[in-house]
Image (tube, rainbow, N blue to C red):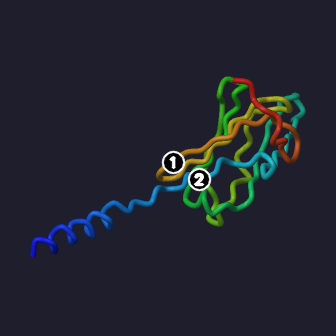
Amino acid sequence: MRGVVPLALVVAGLFSGCITPSIPIPPPDPSDMTFDIAVDASGSSSAILTYPANANYTNGTVYVANRSRGGVGVFQPVNADSSIGPTMPLPAGSGDEIVVSVGTATETVSTCIVLRQGTQDPNADCTF
C-alpha cells in the first residue's frame, strides 16, 4: 500500500503542474496599416487608419495617438470582423509619430510609426 500513495501523488503532481503559458498577441504590423491623410482648406491635416482583420484583436479597442501633437488621439472598438477602421480622423500629418495600440480584455500591444500617406514603412522608427 505504501507504493500506491507516492505514485498517486506523482501522477497528481504531473497533471496539476501542466500550465500552458499564454502566447501574447502580436502588435499591429506597420506594413498592414493604411493611413489616408487629408488636408482641409485651412491647411489642417488629419489621418484615418484602416487595418485588415486579425483574429487576435477580436472584441478589442484600437487607440491611435499622435505623439508629435501632444498625445491627442482617437479610440474606438475593433470592428465585428476583427478589422480596424476606418477610424475617426486623427489630427496628424506626414512625419508625425503615431502610436497605434490594440487592447483586448487581457493585454494591450502597441506600434509606433512615422506617418506617411498609404501603407506605413515598418523600418521608420519613432524616436523615444
Pointer 2 with pointer 1, Cβ within 8 A:
yes
Q: CA distance from mark 2 to mark 1?
A: 8 Å
Under circle 1, the secondary element is loop
**Quadrant where the image shows the N terminus:** bottom left
**Residue positioned 90% across, 33% down in the render:** 41
**Residue positioned 44% across, 60% down in the render:** 20
In-image side of 99 versus 20 (left or right): right
**Residue positioned 87% across, 35% down in the render:** 40
In-image side of 8 versus 106 (left or right): left
- The amino acid at mark 1 is Glu
Looking at the rendering, which quadrant does residue 64 occupy? top right
Under circle 2, the secondary element is loop
What is the x, y in percent for residue 38?
86, 40
**Quadrant where the image shows the C terminus:** top right
What is the x, y in percent for residue 25?
59, 53
**What residue is disc 1 on?**
107
Q: Is residue 63 visible?
A: no
User: Local crowd at mark 1 within 10 Å, few (<14), some, or many (≥20)?
Assistant: few
What is the x, y in percent for residue 81?
65, 66
Of callouts 2 and 1, the N-terminal one: 2
- Given residues 41 and 66, the one toward you in this image is 66
**What residue is disc 2 on?**
25
In-image side of 9 versus 34 (left or right): left
Up/down of 15 relative to 21, above or below: below
Up/down of 89 relative to 18, above or below: above
What is the x, y in percent for residue 126?
75, 29
- Given residues 25 and 48, the one toward you in this image is 25
Up/down of 98 relative to 22, above or below: above
Q: Is residue 73 visible?
A: yes
In-image side of 2 versus 30 (left or right): left
